[in-house]
Amino acid sequence: MVNGVLEIGLLGPVRVLVDGRPVSVAAPRRQVTLGALALTPGRSVSISVLARYLWGEDVPELARRALSTIVTRLRHDLGTDVIASGTGGYTLDLPRDTVDVYRFRALAGAARSARPADELRLLDAALACWRGMPLQDVASEWLVAEHAPGLTEEWYGVTERRIDLLLAAGGHGDLLPQLRDLTAREPLRESMWGRLMVALYRAGRQAEALETYQSVREVLVDQLGVGPSEELRSLHRAVLTNDPAIAAPVTVTRPLRPIRRVRDRARLRPRR
C-alpha cells in the first residue's frame, strides 16, 4: 500500500506517481484494469466491460474471481481505498484531476474560453500532458481501440488550434518542421496539409506550397481514390493566384474551421 498524492498517466505509457515518485504497476492485466478505471474516475466500470478489456472474446468461466484477484493486487500497488467495489463493478475513487486525460481536457476547455493572451499558454500546458500515444503499452486491443482514436483526435484538435494561433502571430517559419512531421505522420489529414501550405506561402515559398498540394492530392487518390476537399482546392487556388487573404498574419479571435479529415468524407473507419 502507498500513501501520498496519487497521479495516473494514460497519455503515453501507463505511469503511476505518488508524490512525484514512480510506482510500478508492471503486470499487463493490472495495467489494463487501471487504464479502464482511470478513463472514468468516480464512475463504476462493470465486471463484464472489464472482462472484455482483459480477455477479449475469450472470457474465462471464472472471470469474476480472476478480476477480483487482479483488483486486490492493484490495490496493493495503489492503496486499499483507491478502488471501490460495487455490486456489478469497480470504481477508481480519485478526483479526475489526478488523471492526465482529464487534466488535458480541463486545460483545453479553459483555453476555449480564455482571453487571447492566455489561450496559447493553456494550450501548451494541455499538450504538455502528453508523453506519447495514449494507452501506449496497454495490452488490450479492445480498450485501446475504444479510447485511443478519440483521445488522439482531441490531441490533434488542440494542436491545430495552437498552430492557428502561431500562424496568426506570424510564426509560419518556426512551424514548418512541425507541420512537415505531422503531415508525414498522418498523410490523410487534409487540415494539416492546408496549414502547411499556408505556412509555406507566408514564408515566401509559393512553389513549395503548390507542390505540397500536388503531394496531398496524389496521396488521397492513391490511397483512397478521392481528390482533395473543396476547402483544400480553394486554398490551392488562393495560393496559385496570390490571394491577399492568406498573405499576411491575422488576428484570430476564435478557432479557424478545420478542413475535414478525408476519412470523414470517405466514411472510412480510423486506422487502429
Image (cartoon, rainbow, N blue to C red):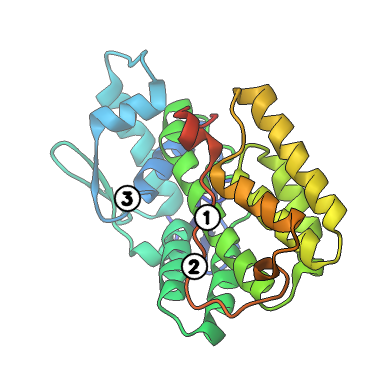
Labelled pair 3, 1 in contact (Cβ < 8 Å): no
Q: Which residue is drawn at 26% across and 56% down?
A: 42
Assign the N terminus to one quadrant of the image. bottom left
Labelled pair 2, 1 in contact (Cβ < 8 Å): yes
N-term mark: 3 or 2: 3
Q: Is residue 234 left or right of residue 178?
A: left
Q: What element carries label 1?
A: loop
The residue identified by callout 3 is 40
The residue identified by callout 2 is 255
**Label 1 CA crowd tier, 10 Å (few <14, some 14–19, many 20+):** some
The residue identified by callout 1 is 258
Is 256 in front, or is 214?
Answer: 214
Label ID, residue 226: none
- Outermost residue toward the left in this view: 87
Q: Where is residue 229 in the image (x, y as percent from the top left)?
A: 56, 41
Q: Is residue 260 above or below residue 20?
A: above
**Label 3 CA crowd tier, 10 Å (few <14, some 14–19, many 20+):** some
